[in-house]
Every structure is written in structure tokens, then in C-alpha cells.
Amino acid sequence: MPDKCFKALVSGRVQGVFFRDSTRRQAQHLALTGHAINLPDGRVEVIACGSEEQLEQLLAWLHEGPEYAVVNALEVETIDIVKPAAFTIG
């Protein structure tokens, strides 16, 4: 069971630049569970669950994103632990 979960809303040029797939790969590398989905308003929502250290590493990566992304803002909140599952994109 993960120690902690967060929800991050990532704003900027984050759709159409492989942000979700890159986030999934990063999360899988860190052994996190959760998802990354495009929102209708142009942001990407990331739910991630794991250890404090793993989550901090993903948050550091989310501030930059993949090569063609431009992250303008990152809103993060701690959420209740969700049922563990593979990290998915939607």
C-alpha cells in the first residue's frame, strides 16, 4: 500500500507534447501508481501514489516535464490514498 498520494494540476503547454506518456514512464520508473489525464481546460491532471521520496522525485520532474512541454504552473494537493493500480494515461 502506498504511503501517500497527491493530485497535481499542470498548466502550460502540456497537451500535444507527450506530457501524459512521459509522466507515465517517469511514474513507472519510480514504481508509482495513479494516472495522468488531459482536462478540457488544457491542463493535465496527475494522481500519483507511493512513498514520500518517490513522489518528491515525480514532483521535481513535473515542474519541467518532457522536452517540448512548457510548465507555467503546478498546483499540488495531498489526497486520500487511492486503491493501488498501474500508472495509466487517459
Image: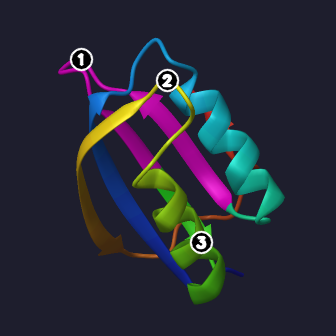
Q: Position of residue 38 (x, y in %)?
A: 39, 24
- Which residue position is annotated with label 3? 57
Q: Amino acid at mark 3?
A: Gln
Q: Is residue 16 above or below residue 31?
A: above
Q: Nearer the viewer, residue 55 or 6?
A: 55
Q: Amino acid at mark 1?
A: Pro
- Which residue position is annotated with label 1? 40
Look at discs 3 and 2 and give the one toward the viewer.
2
Residue located at (34% from left, 32% from top): 70
Distance in Å between CA atoms under marks 1 and 3? 27 Å
With 85 as the anchor, is 77 left or right in this view? left
Residue 90 tag number: none
- Answer yes or no: is residue 46 visible: yes
Look at discs 1 and 3 and give the one toward the viewer.
3
Q: Residues within 10 Å of mark 3 (few under 14, many from 20)?
A: few
Look at discs 2 and 1 and give the one toward the viewer.
2
* Secondary structure category for the residue under label 2: loop
- Which residue position is annotated with label 2? 68
> Is residue 75 inside the magenta stretch?
no
The boundaries of the magenta stretch are 33-46
Residues at circles 2 and 1 in contact by the CB criterion of under 8 Å? no
> Is residue 45 inside the magenta stretch?
yes
Residue located at (52% from left, 77% from top): 56
Q: Residues within 10 Å of mark 1 (few under 14, many from 20)?
A: few
Q: Position of residue 35 (x, y in %)?
A: 56, 44
* Secondary structure category for the residue under label 1: loop
Q: Position of residue 16 (x, y in %)?
A: 46, 11
Q: Residues within 10 Å of mark 2 (few under 14, many from 20)?
A: some
With 40 as the anchor, is 35 left or right in this view? right
Residues at circles 1 and 3 in contact by the CB criterion of under 8 Å? no
Decide which of tag 1 and tag 3 comes sooner along the chain.
1
Q: Position of residue 2 (x, y in %)?
A: 66, 80
